[in-house]
Amino acid sequence: MSAALAEALNPAVFWEYRAILLKGLAFNFYVFACAAAAALILGLGAALLRVNRWRALRWAGTLHVEIFRNAPDYVMVVWIHFVLPLLLGLAIGRRLEFPPFLSAVIALGLVYSGYFAETFRAGIQSIPLGQIEAGRACGMPERLILWRVILPQVVRRMLPEAVNQFVSLFKATTIVSLIAVPDLMYQVSMVTQQEMRPLPLYTGAALTYFAIVFLAASLVRAAAERWRQKVYA
């Protein structure tokens, strides 16, 4: 029994297919980078809508946050890949399909834009109003006040929460294999079908994700805390 268990857990099969699995892991990072960029851009836009003086724009920003922050990652990935192309195809009168990678980036970018929007909003509202009024008194346009006065301080204040959201986003990339994105989990499932040894393969994948998330989160948190503590002239 012990010999059979040791053989089932033997990590040699995971190491044997390391080239294929590393390519899958690289896809995880690719999806993460693109989805993070989309989430940051959309999140900042939604946050600016939420703090706008016009009620209609505030409602639009709130609607964006409530829809995507409360949408499960799994449901959004499946809906974007299978349902959205059908709706758009009916609207334009032609068949439409999204590549799996594009669907994954759109879905995760939208979901996490809701979280980043709230983080940006909290950071913006924490800036003393006197600094904004001082910028206006100096004749600075609103766009320049945003980029030179507000956002540098917002980024500094939102870093701890943003790090947690980036970690969650990377972990969410593990579900993109549902729509055949060739990430690490997809490659593990393909190898498992061939080797019929799921224990070492899925255990190896779990340990790989844990090591990457733990190491990256620790390094980023340490660097972010050191950067936040700096005193700028």
Image (cartoon, rainbow, N blue to C red):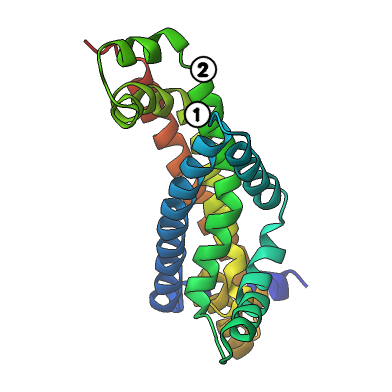
Q: Nearer the viewer, residue 207 or 82?
A: 82
**Residue 165 showing in the rendered view:** yes
Residue type highlighted by circle 1: Pro
The residue under the point 38% across, 23% down is: 150
Residue at the left extreme of this rendering: 233
Secondary structure of residue under mark 1? helix
Residue type highlighted by circle 2: Ser
Secondary structure of residue under mark 2? loop
Mark 2 crowdedness (10 Å alpha carbons): few <14, some 14-19, many ≥20: few
User: Would you say the residues marked 2 and 1 are in contact, meaning their CB atoms lie under 8 Å apart?
Assistant: no
Q: Nearer the viewer, residue 114 or 226?
A: 114
Residue to which mark 1 is pinned = 160
Q: Position of residue 104 (x, y in %)?
A: 54, 68
Which of the numbered marks, if any, corresponds to residue 126? 2
Mark 1 crowdedness (10 Å alpha carbons): few <14, some 14-19, many ≥20: some
Q: Nearer the viewer, residue 25 or 18?
A: 25
Q: Is residue 79 left or right of residue 173?
A: right
Q: How many marks?
A: 2
Q: Position of residue 114 (x, y in %)?
A: 60, 45
